[in-house]
Image (spheres, rainbow, N blue to C red):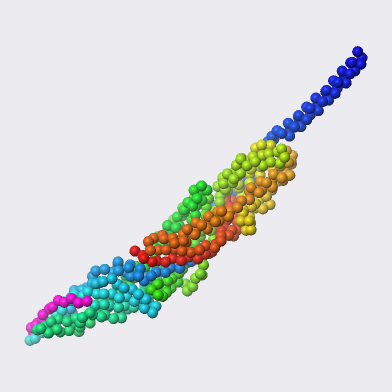
Amino acid sequence: MYLNSAYFCRNFETMKIRLLLILLVAIIVASCSSSKKIQTLKPEADLAAPILYDKELSYLNIPISIKLKDLAFQTNSILTGLIYEDGILEDDNLMMKVWKQAPIEITDSKGKIKVVLPLKVWAKVRYGSTVFGMDLYDTRELNFNGVVTLLGEAKFTNWQLSAKSTVQSVVWKESPSVTIAGRSVPITYLINPAMSYFKTTMEQKIDAAIAKSLNFQDYVLDALEKVSAPVNVHEGYDTWFKIKPLGLNATEAILNKDVVSMNLEMACFMESFIGKPAYETFNKEAIQLRLVDKMKDKFSASLIVVSPYLKASEVMTKNFQNKEFSSGSKKVTIQKVDLWHKNGKVVIALTMNGSLNGTVYLSGIPKYNNVDELIYFDNLNYVLETKSKLMKTANWLAQGIILKKIQAYTSYSIKPELEMAKNQMSQYLNNYSPAKGILINGKVDPIVIKNIQLTDQAMVVTIGTTGNLDLKINGLQ
């Protein structure tokens, strides 16, 4: 019996030790597998202030070419019917009406605008004399045709293309005459003096018609008012694009081979916003046109992309949502991402669950990698208070293994966005016709990121590009 009791005691002690070991292992495993909750101190954002950032001027160089046949079309639509009338007979024994008989022809004559105007003339002529105090006069009406030729210099002044025309010749298809007593009597001595008044009127009317045909002010300012309105370019990301015109430069018009050529250059700010920007009233009176001697062959565009932290947080949350990051048996899933500005850096708040529940805070400086074409956060690390808490409660997360994986996800390529921006611009440079008879072509060079600025409310990215543009007016109606 004594041996059996001793044997039982030894077995009991062994079983107790085993139970304690199992319980200890269970406690360790439970403590390792259960999730922990972390309470970190949130870094407060800098005080909200108006979004202020440095803007870069863009210069859009727009060469314009206008065919003289289109100028003729517009001039003919303006100058119609009766174009001259002298209704007084007594002052020079002549009444006269002049109509445009056929379409005006406008061509190039050694760098000058040549205008050929076919005319139809009705005249009432009084002939005779006063004899012994008696008026012995008779009147005749006659119709005849002629052609007036004018030459003018192509000038661009005060938004208008002017010709400054002068009459070079008036050629009658038949000499103006009346039949008296069966004889044809020339009356050019009456017609030609009257034509001196007619020439001045013709010059003025032709110049006015050409100026009205190509008055750029209304067209350009209306177009600028339309392009200055914000445009939603991507509904999914609530992205808006806005141009703010500031002024226009223009070169003098040049006539060569029946084409009038000139250059316009628009100075403007180009901006893109995530979230609709505030509306700004377009002030037509503020747009001034300035004549210059020369312009660059290419346009240069600096596009400002404003990404408010709130909107950027929503986009990044979509990128991170339900992504799982693991290290051994430890794993966390990012549920939400928030961004804001603090002391010249961007704070990234990651709300997670899994082996650790709560929010951790990181900070870094956004930069652009031109080689890989992506935005990354330089010196990305946990903020000091978060790192201290992690060292005490989740040292495995503080070691940086998962941080490196998270950092890889905070870096994102914007090459597709740059290509999309380039393609969107190219659509307007490939036989684009904003109106009938107007054709725009051009080419955009590769788009590059110039810099990233931080404000209290947004990240501001400056995108730069160059290219060329060509606008032709052909078949304008």
Quarter in which the N terminus is drawn: top right
The quarter holding residue 171 reads: bottom left
Residue 111 pos. (x, y %): 39, 78
Horizontal placement of 471 versus 91: left or right? right
The quarter holding residue 203 reads: bottom left
Give the magenta part as a residue range: 133-145
Residue 35 pos. (x, y %): 69, 34
Vertical order, 135 against 447 (above or below): below
Vertical order, 247 against 308 (above or below): below
Taking the spot 73% from the left edge, 41% from the top edge, the residue there is 396
Horizontal placement of 53 versus 32: left or right? left
Taking the spot 14% from the left edge, 80% from the top edge, the residue there is 126
Q: Is residue 54 shown to the viewer in this render?
A: no
Quarter in which the C terminus is drawn: bottom left
Residue 267 highlighted magenta (yes or no): no
Residue 159 pos. (x, y %): 40, 68
Residue 397 pos. (x, y %): 71, 42
Q: Is residue 443 shown to the viewer in this render?
A: yes
Say how many tags the image has: 0
Camera-nearest residue between 384 and 101: 101
By secondary structure, the bulk of the magenta-drawn segment is best described as strand
Q: Residue furthest bottom?
A: 132
Vertical order, 166 against 311 (above or below): below
